[in-house]
Image: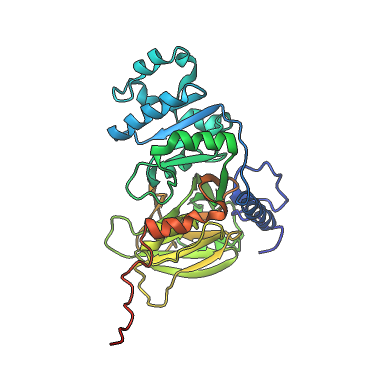
């Protein structure tokens, strides 16, 4: 791909301004510069503590778990003494959260206890100084889904099952939050993907079949025609995008492109495109490698491939991947984003995947991401086995 060509189907090739909202509209050069800047900044942040002025805190909790809501009440009760606290609006009437008790105990609570919803987070993400999650890895992914663009620093307490992304013990929440405010925080910028579903547009001669359409030609802008695809929905994800066969019993057939190259035809149950953060999730179950979050890349892992030689691989973070359904495919495929927003891709549709301009800032307990190794050993029990006994000499 040339240095000034855009990564979007049939968009102007002129340089786009820095304010461009979507990564898929950036040129190859802009994507490379963005990826380099994020990598450089992430390494720098991993070596020092950042002092933050914390006034407004947003709390995300597992609202369907009563025990976690009780922990939320405990946390908010302590935070209201010094901070303005936002909790999800559904908790306002929840008996376990007990808003009335909090307001009676804190006379100024009516001004400092507020409620958030999706619209508030989408329209005013910059108003929050810190996000605290109470739950497991799914709650962290929910925070990423909540903030599709700008993301405040996220401090995650482990109240879930696995806890690979949740680094902190809630038992010490007061000490941890005080230390973060007084001494500063170590922040890791986790790479996210921006994924856009591109829907095939209908042509006049489609019904006549006089000029069969070819997905590859349209993706690579070889065909001379009007607009062949229109963007539908766009998602920023932290873990992975999965393209699979869906409820059908037949295998998935999809074309995989990297920049201007046709990489391969996917004939399998599906394919997982994962971030380094997502390398310990679905990608790992599909046979993908474990990748340290400071190594920026895009993991491609087939799911039950119909070829013994289709092995997982990693491509650079400034690449643009496209996974599409060829016009001649026997059936449609399905696409999901961090396990949510499941969408059907019909013949001619594809999803474009690129590094997001808005990484996910996670508060870490140690410098340079060394707590990732702790998670491997403690959470995944990585390479743990009974050690071989030494020979005994009589």
Side of 253 where 220 appears, left or right: right
Residue 69 or 253: which is nearer the viewer? 69
Q: Is residue 372 visible?
A: yes
All told, the count of numbered labels is: 0
Q: Is residue 359 visible?
A: no
Side of 218 where 377 appears, left or right: left
Side of 120 where 390 appears, left or right: left
Q: Residue at x 38, y 38 (%)?
A: 171
- Quadrant of res 5: bottom right
Residue 303 or 344: which is nearer the viewer? 303
Spot occupied by residue 318 in the image (x, y as percentages of width and height): 61, 59
Spot occupied by residue 147 in the image (x, y as percentages of width and height): 51, 38
Q: Residue at x 56, y 60 (%)?
A: 295
Residue 341 or 359: which is nearer the viewer? 359
Spot occupied by residue 111 in the image (x, y as percentages of width and height): 49, 15
Using the image, determine if residue 361 lies above or below residue 97.
Answer: below
Residue 61 or 307: which is nearer the viewer? 61
Q: Residue at x 54, y 27 (%)?
A: 56
What is the quadrant of the N terminus in the image?
bottom right
- Quadrant of res 286: bottom left
Spot occupied by residue 172 in the image (x, y as percentages of width and height): 42, 38
Using the image, determine if residue 44 lies above or below residue 180.
Answer: below
Using the image, determine if residue 295 lies above or below residue 102.
Answer: below
What is the quadrant of the C terminus in the image?
bottom left
């Amino acid at each position: 791909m040339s240095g000034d060509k855009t990564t979007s189907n049939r968009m102007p090739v002129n340089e786009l301004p820095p304010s461009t909202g979507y990564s898929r509209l950036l040129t190859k050069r802009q994507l490379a510069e963005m990826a380099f800047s994020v990598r450089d900044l992430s390494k720098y942040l991993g070596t020092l503590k950042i002092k933050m002025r914390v006034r407004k805190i947003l709390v995300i909790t597992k609202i369907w778990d009563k025990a976690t809501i009780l922990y939320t009440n405990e946390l908010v009760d302590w935070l209201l003494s010094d901070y303005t606290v936002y909790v999800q609006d559904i908790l306002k009437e929840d008996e376990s959260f007990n808003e009335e008790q909090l307001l009676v105990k804190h006379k100024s609570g009516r001004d400092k206890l507020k409620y958030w919803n999706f619209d508030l987070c989408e329209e005013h993400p910059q108003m929050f100084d810190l996000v605290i999650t109470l739950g497991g890895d799914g709650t962290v992914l929910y925070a990423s889904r909540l903030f599709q663009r700008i993301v405040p620093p996220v401090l995650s307490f482990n109240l879930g099952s696995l806890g690979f992304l949740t680094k902190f013990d809630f038992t010490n929440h007061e000490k941890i939050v005080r230390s973060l405010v007084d001494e500063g925080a170590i922040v890791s910028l986790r790479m996210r993907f921006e994924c856009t579903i591109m829907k095939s547009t209908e042509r006049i001669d489609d019904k006549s079949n006089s000029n069969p359409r070819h997905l590859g030609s349209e993706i690579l802008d070889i065909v001379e025609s009007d607009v062949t695809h229109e963007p539908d929905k766009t998602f920023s994800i932290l873990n992975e995008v999965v393209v699979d066969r869906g409820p059908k019993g037949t295998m998935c057939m999809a074309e995989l492109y990297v920049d201007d190259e046709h990489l391969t035809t996917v004939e399998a149950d599906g394919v997982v495109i994962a971030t380094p953060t997502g390398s310990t999730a679905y990608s790992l179950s599909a046979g993908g490698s474990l990748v340290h979050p400071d190594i920026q890349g895009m993991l491609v892992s087939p799911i039950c491939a119909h070829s013994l030689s289709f092995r997982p691989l990693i491509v650079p973070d400034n690449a643009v991947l496209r996974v599409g359904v060829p016009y001649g495919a026997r059936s449609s495929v399905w696409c999901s984003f961090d396990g949510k927003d499941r969408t059907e891709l019909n013949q001619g549709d594809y999803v474009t995947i690129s590094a997001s301009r808005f990484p996910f800032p996670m508060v870490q307990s140690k410098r340079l991401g060394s707590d990732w190794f702790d998670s491997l050993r403690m959470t995944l029990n990585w390479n743990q086995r009974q050690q071989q006994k030494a020979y005994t000499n009589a």
